[in-house]
Amino acid sequence: MVEGERCMTEFDAQVLADLSVLKNQMATLPGDGNSGRIAIIEGRVDKHEQSFQRAKGFAVATGAVFTLVQFVLQLLHRK
């Protein structure tokens, strides 16, 4: 072995492997370490809000149709 040159031990290899995993995980955690997770949660909340708005729109449309049918039936009944 040349002076100043070191063989990599099993421990060194494990540390480098763990560091590589950590670096990959840090790519999704910009800023304070929670922004990536918060962005994922925000996306899920947006999808739920969109579904809720669609359900509200369907309920309003169904109510309008029901009211219109009831109004027409009352007009026909009066004749």
Image (cartoon, grey):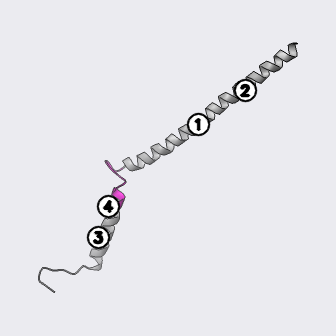
Mark positioned earlier in the residue sequence (4 or 3): 3
Q: Work out how far the residue at label 4 is from the one at label 2, CA to CA, in angstroms.
A: 57 Å
> Residue 45 in the image: x percent, y percent?
50, 42
For marks 4 and 2, give the one nearer the viewer: 2
Region in magenta: 23-33
Q: Which mark is residue 65?
A: 2
Q: Which mark is residue 16?
A: 3
Q: Residues within 10 Å of mark 3 (few under 14, many from 20)?
A: few
Mark positioned earlier in the residue sequence (4 or 2): 4
Foreground residue, 57 or 17? 57
Q: Work out how far the residue at label 1 is from the one at label 2, CA to CA, in angstroms.
A: 20 Å
- Check disc 4 and report the residue beneath it: 23
- Check disc 1 and report the residue beneath it: 52
Q: Residue at x 45, y 43 (%)?
A: 42
Q: Which mark is residue 69?
A: none
- CB under 8 Å between callouts 1 and 4? no
Task: Tell me the element at label 1.
Answer: helix
Q: Work out how far the residue at label 3 is from the one at label 1, CA to CA, in angstroms.
A: 47 Å
- Residue 34 drawn above or below residue 79: below
For marks 2 and 3, give the one nearer the viewer: 2
Q: Residues within 10 Å of mark 4 (few under 14, many from 20)?
A: few
Q: Residue at x 13, y 84 (%)?
A: 2
Q: Looking at numbered disc 1 in the image, what kind of residue is underneath it?
A: Phe
Q: Which image quarter is the C terminus in?
A: top right
